[in-house]
Image: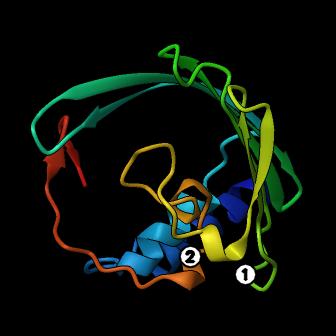
Amino acid sequence: MKTLTCFLGLCLSLIPLFGAKTGNPSGKEIMQKVDNREDGDTRVSNLEMTLVSKTGNKRVRKVTSKRKDYGEDSKMLMIFEEPADVEGTGYLAWEFNDPKKDDSRWLYMPAMRKLRRISGSSEDDYFMGTDFTYEDMGERNVEEDNHTLLGQGKYNGHEC
């Protein structure tokens, strides 16, 4: 018991040295923490996208998204459920953590019964009538971007 007490005392005395850093964390440090958080090996989401045109017209799309991790890499499948004109459209992406390795992406369009591979030159094309590109639909490696902390504040009573 004495050994455990000494060990706990030593750990508690080191907290100020290795605890929370004083000052503001950098944008990159925040994004690294987000990237490192545990989110499980499989995830299923039901999404609703509202597309708003320049004239204010709204179109709502419902999507089921499934993701499975394979070590550092993952596969994501999105299937459009509504409206009828996009129902059954599928988007599959094999995402690699290694920034030197290109992700593989495919789009299945049931109305045309076609499967289209999204090549690297098409990554900047817009995804399903949205303002997002195919590249935006995938995960990002923290090292690929610049991150800046723009401010701090409270959200639901928590410092953010």
| Residue count near mark 1 (Cα–Cα under 10 Å), binned few <14, some 14–19, many ≥20 | few
Q: Position of residue 125 (x, y in %)?
A: 51, 63
Q: Which residue type does callout 2 highlight?
A: Val
Residue 14: name its quadrant. bottom right
What residue sits 16% from the left and 69% below the top? 151
Q: Which residue type does callout 1 highlight?
A: Pro
Label 1 sits on residue:
99
Residue 94: name its quadrant. bottom right
What residue sits 11% from the left and 34% below the top? 56
Camera sees residue 41: no
Camera sees residue 38: yes
Number of marks: 2
**Residue sitting nearer the eye, 158 or 150:** 150
Which of the two discs, 2 and 1, sits closer to the camera?
A: 1
Please, which residue is most extreme toward the left here?
Answer: 55
| Residue count near mark 2 (Cα–Cα under 10 Å), binned few <14, some 14–19, many ≥20 | some
Mark 2 to mark 1: distance in Å?
10 Å
Label 2 sits on residue:
142
Mark number displayed over residue 154: none
Residue 30: name its quadrant. bottom left
Specify the color scheme.
rainbow
**Residue sitting nearer the eye, 96 or 134:** 134
Q: Where is residue 76 in the image (x, y as percent from the top left)?
A: 74, 43
Q: Earlier in the sequence, mark 2 or mark 1?
A: 1
Is residue 117 shown left or right of residue 147?
A: right
Label 2 SS:
helix
